[in-house]
Image: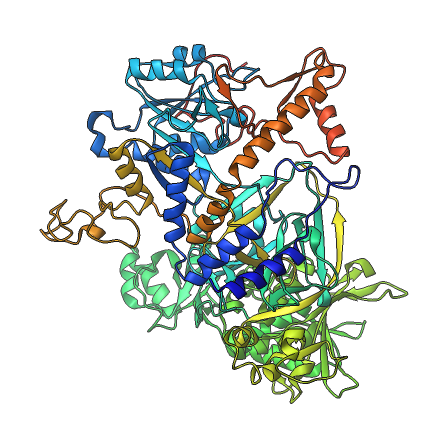
Amino acid sequence: MDIQLASLITDHFRKTFPPKQFTPGESTVPVSGKVFDQDELMYGVQAVLDGWWTEGVFAEKFEKAFSTVVGARYVSLVNSGSSANLIAFSALTSTVFGEKALKPGDEVITSATGFPTTVNPIIQNRCIPVFIDNDISTKNATIEGIKKAISPKTKAIMLAHTLGNPLPLDEILDIVKEKNLWFIEDCCDALGSTYKGKHVGTFGDVATFSFYPAHQMSCSHNTLIPYLDESGKWRMEKIEKIYDKYVNQSENIKILAFDKNYKADWVPPSAIIRHRLGRSKDMLRIKTQHGREVEVTEDHSVFIIDQDTAEIIPKPAKEITPDDYIVSTNFIPSNSLIEYVDILETFQDIDAYVSNFSLQNLDMVKNRDYAWQYKTRNALPIKYLSCYDLNKENILVGLSQSNKIPARIFISDELCRLVGYFLAEGSYKNGLIFSFYKNEEDLIADVIHISTNLFNLSPLIIKMKSNAVNIQIDSKNLEILFKEVFKIPKGAKNKRIPWFMYHANDTCIKSFVYAYTRGDGSIKILEDNTNRIDVTSVSKELLNDFQYLLSKIGISASFYRRNKFSKEKYINKIIASNDENFTLCFGGYQYKDKIIIKQNIHDRNNFADQIPLLPIFRKYISVSKDQQVISKKRLQKYLKSNPRLYALATGDLSFLKVRSIEKIFYNKNEYVYDFSVPGKENFYGGFLGIFLHNTMGEGGAVVTQKPLLHKAIRQFRDWGRDCWCDTGKDNTCGKRFKWQLGDLPMGYDHKYIYSQIGYNVKLTDMQAAIGLAQLSKLPGFIEKRKNNFNKLLTGLSEYSKHLSFSAAQKGSDPCWFGFAIVVNKNAPFSKLELVEYLESKKIGTRSLFAGNLLKHPAYKGRTDIRVSGSLS
């Protein structure tokens, strides 16, 4: 790295992250945290500047350094401790181990008091976890428990050193040797712990480590997220519901994220994660100008634009200030255009009829008299329809033998206007009803025209005493279309924009916007002679849908709750109070020819195009000192000499000033959620849309002393390929094109032969770079952890009558991951009361991992597990 650049980065880091002092009563003591300085930043930047972002030189250096630290012969880096456990266990199923290889149905002894990712790999490989109890003092499994759990099917022991306290390793190794078992050490909490002077992780056949600093959970359960489902259809649902549907198949969906060139696109997440909020964190609601907002944990980051460098950086929510500009977008990328929607499938379950059918379908009708009737009436029960081609046939479908609608609904500007009118003014009653004021003659005429033209239906015009005119389309077929196919629920508060609208072309979307805002909105002429279009609704979710749709055509709207009025107002067929009355507005457009068209206005008046006028931009353009923002389009021509700033000005990102940050009530037992998006580390969601950060500051390692096991580990880690060449190297075996394996021909490239059902869970070089910097601090970390444990033990010893503390395993020197407290049965207070007291004093707590795993929903009632003993 250039020395001058390194110095600038270091100086900036010291200014941005000054050392923080703990002040009792003012700060929170978290359950866990991270310690880092300019070293981690410098190494991470070096990895980025080197341009080798997969496993590279830093990974190689880290593996060698880590091997020296723990005394392991072979180290394989992975992206997390959880992945380390998966790879370690999967490697033992490799066929290279012959009869000793783990097979489905084999039993593996493990602890019920543990973490799910110690147990899950056993289940994922179709082996049987055998749960045993732990010792109340050491918190580890006992030798007696292990011995009692052994059966003829036992093939392995997989246990964690709980909270860094080493297991009784000598006795476990005696059992392993006697019974010829595999032994996997989960050392994810025990880096730095030793047993009889030797590092844990070097006793078993294979061991795992984690470099995960702390959980960085994200947004509240009701955060709305746009995504594409497994069939590529647009969806907008709460993240909680997405988790429930796709937690085990997250790769089947796509969510919105931006890349290093500031371009937004649809990408598959690698995981959807949830975690209980717990008592050590607060939830914050961040609101920006124009009404966008999101609810996140205080330590979760949102993206801002750095006002010194114009870099897009994550910033923890609790550090956000009203001076920050949050990153959003007014560009929703294309998600495949849809020309039509076929509705035959919807009608097949409700005994419908079809017309204009191919006569060969009559062969399905056994009674020839009926066949003749169906032919003459041009109406056939849909159950007989087996031969059809909607690309060539104009089939009609309906509940009765008359008044049918097309079986293929084309997405046209007229259809989109009808949907817009319905969302604004429509309701269901044996068809569709639209309510307009009598002076809205052009809208009334348009609904009548569309109904007749698209569906050959003649609406009834009903004049009401309240100066309203109802347009009534008596068609249950149309009601089914809008309810079941378009998925528009009943009730003004429940209405949502149909999914297909997000797959329509710009003209159709602008036609919808025209109809929806004409029906439920108004247009105003502002002082600068531009127009502002307002749309009012009793549903925030509908307006959220509307902003995301506007983003498809590059429009950003402002959201606000309307001013109080003296009396209740009639909106969308219901009486609405001020608390239910919301408005979204946008400028620069006018109505013409049943569509919205852009006015000839300056881009600086379009806040979707604005960017903060940062000092770094002023070096390239001379403007008034009082000017705070500038049009990106205007700025672009001045930034062509700076590729990064030019990419920012031409990218898809928008920037909104923070309006407020407030702490909100959130049940501590509720879940919070996050997506993991490899290579992007961000996702889009929240009310009206904000980019949220997901951390990649973690990693893990699988270590072993055995060459054959190391080869199997690498195979499962690296896609399952047979080749054992290190990343970036070729032909280590010396006969890359001289192998014959499987049914492949002789000479097939060994680098691309796959002998295992593997994964791709390697660490990035940036993670390895940060880990390498952290590794130099490891001795200090170990010393601090031991000192902290001893201080707590000494300070709390006077309460030993009511509290019990962890005891180190005989012969070990733990590097304690946490300080465990057990409330004795005779104590005058409960565990919950102690927890609430500590949390009230801003001291973070957590339970001992999962407590009893078998009491959790994921494991309750499973038949592929066994329990040994009482788990008392």
- Check the image and tell me how it is coloured: rainbow
Which residue is at a point 40% across and 10% down the rendered structure image? 148
- Answer with left or right where residue 86 lies relative to residue 218: left
Counting from the top left corner in percent of width and height, residue 837 is at: 76, 28
- Spot the residue most to the front: 3
Q: Quadrant of residue 469?
A: bottom right
- Spot the residue most to the right: 566
- Spot the residue most to the left: 746
Q: Is residue 421 visible?
A: yes
In the rendered image, the vertical position of residue 629 relative to residue 475, given as above or below = below
Q: Quadrant of residue 807?
A: top right
Counting from the top left corner in percent of width and height, residue 352 is at: 45, 58
In the rendered image, the vertical position of residue 759 relative to residue 2, given as above or below = above
Which residue is at a point 51% across and 61% down the rendered structure image? 257
- Answer with left or right where residue 747 lies relative to residue 166: left
Counting from the top left corner in percent of width and height, residue 90 is at: 33, 35
Which residue is at a point 31% across and 46% down the rendered structure image? 718
Which residue is at a point 34% across and 57% down the rendered structure image? 384
- Answer with left or right where residue 730 lies relative to residue 570: left
Q: Which image quarter holds the C terminus?
A: top right
* 431 and 13: which is toward the camera: 13
* 11 and 89: which is toward the camera: 11
Q: Quadrant of residue 393?
A: bottom left
